[in-house]
Structure formats: C-alpha cells, structure tokens
Amino acid sequence: MFYTITLYASLVIFCIGLVYKISNWFRFNIGQPAGNMSVSTRIGAAIKGILSTFFSVKVFTLIKVFVLDVLLQARLLRKDFVRWLAHICIFGGFMLLLLMHALETHISSALFSDYYSTLNPFMFLRDFFGLMVFFGLALVIFRRFLSKAPRPTTNGMDYYAIIILAVIMISGILLEGTKIVSHSVYEEMVEEYAVLDEEEEIPLESYWVDKFGVVSPDVKGPFDKDTLKEGKELHEMSCADCHSRPQWAFLGYGVATVSKPIALSLDRAKIHTLLWYVHFLACFIGLAYLPFSKFFHIFATPATYLLNAVMEREKSDPANLATRQAIELDACIHCGDCTARCSVAVAFKQIPNPNILPSEKLVALRALASGKELPEEQLRVIQEGSYICTDCHRCTDVCPAGINLEELWFSMREHLAKLGYPKPEVWARQGMGANFDLTKLKEQTLSLTPVDRKFLGGLGTSAQASTFSVCFGCENCTNVCPVVGNYENPQEVLGLVPHQIMHALALGRRDLTFGSRMLWDCVTCYICQEYCPQGVSVTDVFYELKNLSFIHLKEKA
Amino acid sequence: MEFALFLGCTTPSRLKQYEYSSRAVLGELGVTLVDIDEFKCCGYPLRNIDFKAFVLSSARNLALAKKEDLKLMALCKCGYGTLKMASHLIKENSSLREEINEILAKEGLEYKGDVDILHFLTVLHKEVGLEAIKDKITRPYENLKVATHYGCHALRPSQVTEFDDPVAPTLFDELVSVTGAKSIEWPMKLECCGGPLSGVNDELSFAFTDKKLLDAKKASADYLTTGCPFCQIQFDTFQDQTGHGRGTNHHVPAILYSQLLGLCLGLDKETLGFDSKRTDIAKIESFLSP
C-alpha cells in the first residue's frame, strides 16, 4: 500500500515536473530572438518545424544522430574514451536495470514467459548491469574528485546526482545480499511455495544452507550426504524452477558471504525490509526529482543533438531558435569541459567572479532566462562575468552536449543590455559622466582641497600609472591624440582631454578624471605615450584609471 | 628555426585564413611551428578591467613557452603588444613578479620575463630574412601598389614592444617590397584602425577606419595589407559597414600579409584560405607576373 502510494506520488510529481520543464522551453527567452512571442506561437512554430523535418530528407540525419550520438554517444567517444566508458556504463547499466528489473512486471515478464528475477540469465544480468553502473560511478568519482586534471567547481546538483545513484545501487546490492542469507525470507518462501512434511524441513533447509547461502539458526553444516541428497530432491521439486544458484548474483553473493557472521542478527532486525524501503524510496525520489535535477539532461541533451543536427541559424524561425536555446540550458550537465578549456578562465584567479567561467555563466543564464527579477547587485556581477570573454569559441567546440555556448553568450549580453547592463566599458562611458557633473560646470571654481589621497594611492598597481606626476603640461599628448583630433570641439564630447586628465590627477580630483569620456573613447594607440617628452605613460595611466573606475562602480553598487 | 605559435583567440575563431596562410608561408620558408594547446587569452581583453588579471593571463602563456624553452611568435599585434608589455612589467617590477609567480606556481609554472616574443612579421624580417624570402619567390607582383598598415600595439610604446622605429618604421614596407609590389607612402600609415573601440563606441571606431581607407585611396593604393586579425577584420569585415553608415565609400580591399606573400611564393589559394566568393581579394592574382 505504502509502496503503491509513493510510486504513484512520485510518478505524478515526475509528470508534472516534466510538463513544467518542457513548458519552460517555450516560455524562456534569452535576448531578442523570440521578441514577445506567445507560448502558443512558439509551440506552433516548433510543431511546424518538427513536422517539416520529419517529412524531409533531414529525417535520415535525425536517425543517424539518434543512433550514433544519443544511443552510442559517439561524440563523447571521440573526445575521451574513459569518459565515454563511464557514461555508457552508467547510462547503459541503469537503463537495462530499469527495463529488466524495475519494470519487470511490465517488460521482462511480458517478453519472457520463463522470467524470474532469481533465475539465470536474469539473476546474473541484474548484477552485471549493476556492476556496469558501479564501474561508471567509480570512474566519475575518480575523475571529479581524485584525478589531478583540473576540475571545475562541483555544485549541490552534482553531489545529488552521484549520491542518489549510489544510494539506489548500494541499497539494491545490500538488499540482494541480505535476502540471500535471510532465514526469515527463506521461511516465508517455503511457506508459500513448498508443500513439506515436518521431517522434510530439515533436509531442504540444510541443502539451502549448504548451497544457497542461507544462514539458519536451526541447522548448521557440515551436513551428511543423505540429508543433502534428500534436500536436493525437495529443492528440485519445489524451488529449482525459480532459483538459480546465488553465486550468479555475484555482487549480492559477495555481500552475503561477508555478512554471514552477523546474518542472524541482521535478519532479526529485519534489515532487508529496511533496505527494501531505502531502495525503492531512493528510486522514487530519483524519479520524482528527475525533471528538476541534472538527470533531466537525458531529455534535453538528446534534443540538443537532434536540433543542432537539423537546424541552421540563418534559415530557422526565430521562435525555434529561442526554444532551442532554452532547451540547451537544460542540456548542460555541468561537466566543466568548457571552463577547463576557457581562454579567460585564468582571470578568475584574480577576479573572483564565478560568472567568468562558462559552466557557471550558464547557471546565471538560467536565472536570467526564467525572467525572474534579480537584484541589481547580482546583475552587475553577471554583467561583469559575461563580458570577460574573448569570443574564442573554445567552449562551444568542446561541449560534449553540443550546446552552442557562444550563441548563448551573445544572447545573454543582448538580454543584459535590454535590462540596462551593456558592455561594462559602454556602461561606464555612459554612466560615469552622468555621475560626475563637474566637467559640465565650466564656470564653477573648483576647490583644490581636499586631495583624494585614497584615489591617488590606488594608482600604482603597474608602477607606470604614477608617472602622471612628472607631467609639465606641454599638451603634446593632446595634440597628437587621434581621438581628440577627430572632434571639432573635443571637450564637449570627451570631457577632459589627455593632458588635462594628467593635471586633474596631480590635483587628486577623482571626479574630474572618472567623469571624462576620454578614458573610454581612448583607442589605446599609445601615440601620446610615445610622444611624451617627460616619459609619462599616458595610455597606461588611462588603463589603470579604467580599472579604478570599475572598482569604484562596484563599490557604489 | 622553431617557434611556439601563439594564435590568440580572434584568429582561430574569426579569421581562420590568417592561421592557414601563416602556417603555409612559414612552412614554405622552413620555419617550424610548435602548437601549445594550453595557450589561452593573451590578457589584452582584460586590460580595461583588471591590471593583474591581464598580467597573469599573459604571463601564464609566456611561462608555458618558457617551459618548452621556445621563442614565442604571435600572429596578432594586440597579442604581441600585450605579451611584450606583461613580460616587460614582470621583468622590471619585482613585487609584481613575485605576486604573479605565486599564482603560476600552483600550476607548476614560473615566469621571470625571459622569453623572446616575436611577431609574425618580425620572424619573417629578422629570423627568416628578406634574402631568403626573395629566393623563394616564384611569381613576384608587378604594378601592385600596397599600403602597409603597421598596427599600433606592435609599434608603440616602442621601448616596450621593440618592433621597429616608432616614427619611421620600415620593416613592413621592406616585406612588401620583397614581393615585387610597391609599398606606397601614405600619411595615415601609422595610425589606429579603430578596432579597439569596436563594440564600445562604434561610431568613433568606424570614423577611424573610414579616415584611413580614404587616405589609402587618395594615395592610390590597390590593396591595404595588415598583419593583425583585429586590423584586418576592421578593414575587411567592417569595411562595408563603415562606408555604409557615413555615406562614403572609399573601397580599398584589405589583404593579410601572409596571403599576399603566400601567392607569390607559389602557394595555392585554398592553402592560403582565400575565400572564393570574395572578388576583391581574388583579383590580387592578376598582379602576379606570368
């Protein structure tokens, strides 16, 4: 009863979760592609796209990709044999267990008239499939936690995935093992299936203790030949039709052998019943939570493979492009390949913003795509991270899930710009001038004190930035600057021009320097620096001022 | 001659033909290139954001080259300038050196400012040599006028980059002359392509590009040649956009030097990554001597 209720409850949660997650594919929109299209328009576009693909030659591409990339995981095999082995063992082993063992009444019994879980080959296969999963899991754990190769961050979802799989598998094997040795299970079976006279009980039990690993409180070996012979006959009459030797269930038998000394107390404590609860509850939790966990990739990643095989960016309906991006968000399994390959990941060591790393950017992107309102502080951090990227395309090249990561980053930036968080340089260029309106008040007399010493002290990371102090105001830098030269009235557009910025620094005026668009319109051509007779590193001073502006903006946020 | 090839990010992702043609040309001239898979961002895109992140990113690449005991060759002018700058800073500034090496040490790396950093053009000019190139040229150009675009970040600050004379450089012009083409004089030769402001202030960025193109056109250049992906993208990919928005059209096709040289070395167009759809650079062949 409890089993049935929890089974149906978890199935219901699973189905609701599935519908919810799939509905997100049509609701989420990153950046512009789908504009303000309604969910129904997007579902309509998807159906149209799917149908037109099915009735075209592209269907063969789909079949090929399904067999090679989805079932055989050829993409992963091409990348890394060990990972492919780990994944195929977990995927293959678990799927086979699901079909043969978990769904035995629906599948195995229907297919094989002689199916019994305790009969070979099924008994052996169950443990063999289990061994596959264990082997895969061991490889995963080794790679993620023990191997020396640089691994990215492991988050709660990654732990959950490993733990729930491990609990299901270990409880299953322990359950099998404790049932083999259990005397009470033996007695129940005898009561149900064997018709025995009282004097026949000892020989059968002796035979099962001797050959089937049961640990009995009543009989103990060694047994004499006649008893065993009689036991064997009884066994063949009542049990053999459904029972192969337990050694075939090698994992469970291993547990049984090890647990023999304490088998009787385990049996009295009804440990196998407890394990049975643990086992099926873990399975049901896994099932119910699947749509919300990273296991959802078993739907989203194949969908991504298939979609990317047949969709072309230029020719596809924008609605479907938006939908594909939403699916791709679910296809990520946080393996961290992108981050390991990322060109700018090294910056993370200096700028501790996880959004620099592609695998973590995706986490932020999910939050953005869901449309929920994020606090300004978080948006700033995401903005910074999303622009620390060289568009080198490496993340996209290595992604084993085939996600078009770079396209996602472009959409992400579009999305952020729409929310008022453009490229930091653009943002600072627009925003800083507005923050410091002193540059606009040309008539105002500025007080020379107090000098902002903290600001000046901050200029010196590169040792070049302090060279501003030797500027004697010859204006060479300004005269050779091609940006200044581009405007009829440079100060109107740029605020302070280069030599004035050097002067403002000498005066310790943070407001004047930060408020000048000159900083952000500098093309970094280094002509000013090259031509400075005093050796002021003008361009490098600008670079450092830009760094300081970002720090200032961050502090303000 | 052996160099660690520093491709950077932009060339492989947006200008593959630069990689293909450089490899082909250097291969033809007997230069061996070593690929270091772990090379990553040169640090240039981080310069606006965080000084130390830039130096760290740069130094990590240099440390990798050092580990292999190789000289490093960059294809990109910005990458070249950035690596040179970081190397210079690390050499000059002991506290920065310590700080950076503390982080590098976690990966078993170390950098003290002692890797030779060269640009593709420097390798051709100084390591291979003009004479050696000349010997290999099978079909020199005739009547071809080329405007050389030097690229700011290789040229300046000259004390750090050590590329060529910052006021009157000749390196690139000599490399053009050796192909039989005429390197023309043009007033804006040493100025910025506008690339660094792309995406920050597009209007200003394109104004720079536009001015240079107009100047090259006035000097009657048939082609403009570059040795940097940012400059090439600015002059090539964005050329239509720059003219378009401003109602001007000073069309001067831009060609990578590696492709320009490759053709007269007798390398075929596919190897050099010429795009058959682009008629304006395909026309370059008509200048080759028979």
Image (cartoon, rainbow, N blue to C red):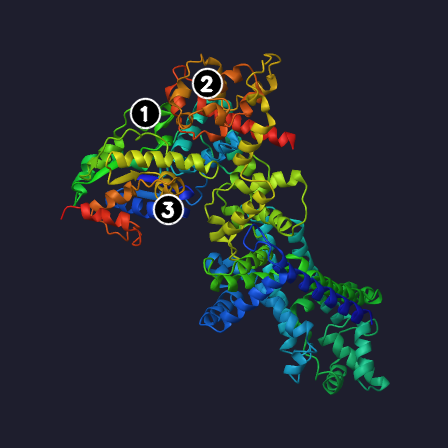
Q: Chain of mark 2?
A: A
Tag count:
3
Foreground: disc 1 or disc 2: 2
Where is residue A301, by image quadrant? bottom right
Q: Badges 3 and 1: C-beta atoms under 8 Å apart?
A: no
| Quadrant of the image containing the N terminus of chain A | bottom right
Foreground: disc 3 or disc 2: 2
| Quadrant of the image containing the C terminus of chain A | top right
Q: From this viewpoint, which residue is outermost toward the left?
A: B290
**Residue under pointer 1:** B166
Q: Amino acid at mark 1?
A: Pro
Give the x, y percent position of residue A110: 66, 82
Give the x, y percent position of residue A85: 53, 61
Q: Residues within 10 Å of mark 1 (few under 14, many from 20)?
A: many
Q: Chain of mark 1?
A: B
**Residue under pointer 2:** A499
Q: Chain of mark 3?
A: B
Marker disc for residue B15: 3
* Of B261 and A190, the residue lying toward us: B261
Q: Does residue B282 sit above or below A291 in this rendering?
A: above
Alpha carbon separation for disc pair 1 and 2: 21 Å
Is disc 3 in the same subunit as disc 1? yes
Callout 3: SS: loop
Q: Does residue A148 sit above or below B109 in this rendering?
A: below
Which residue lies at the image location 52% right of the left edge and 36% below the top edge?
A426
Q: Amino acid at mark 3?
A: Leu
Is disc 3 in the same subunit as disc 2? no
Which residue lies at the image location 49% right of the left edge and 56% below the top edge?
A80
Which residue lies at the image location 29% right of the left edge and 39% below the top edge?
B225
User: Upstream in the sequence, badge 3 or badge 1?
Assistant: 3
Q: Does residue A37 sit above or below B263 in this rendering?
A: below
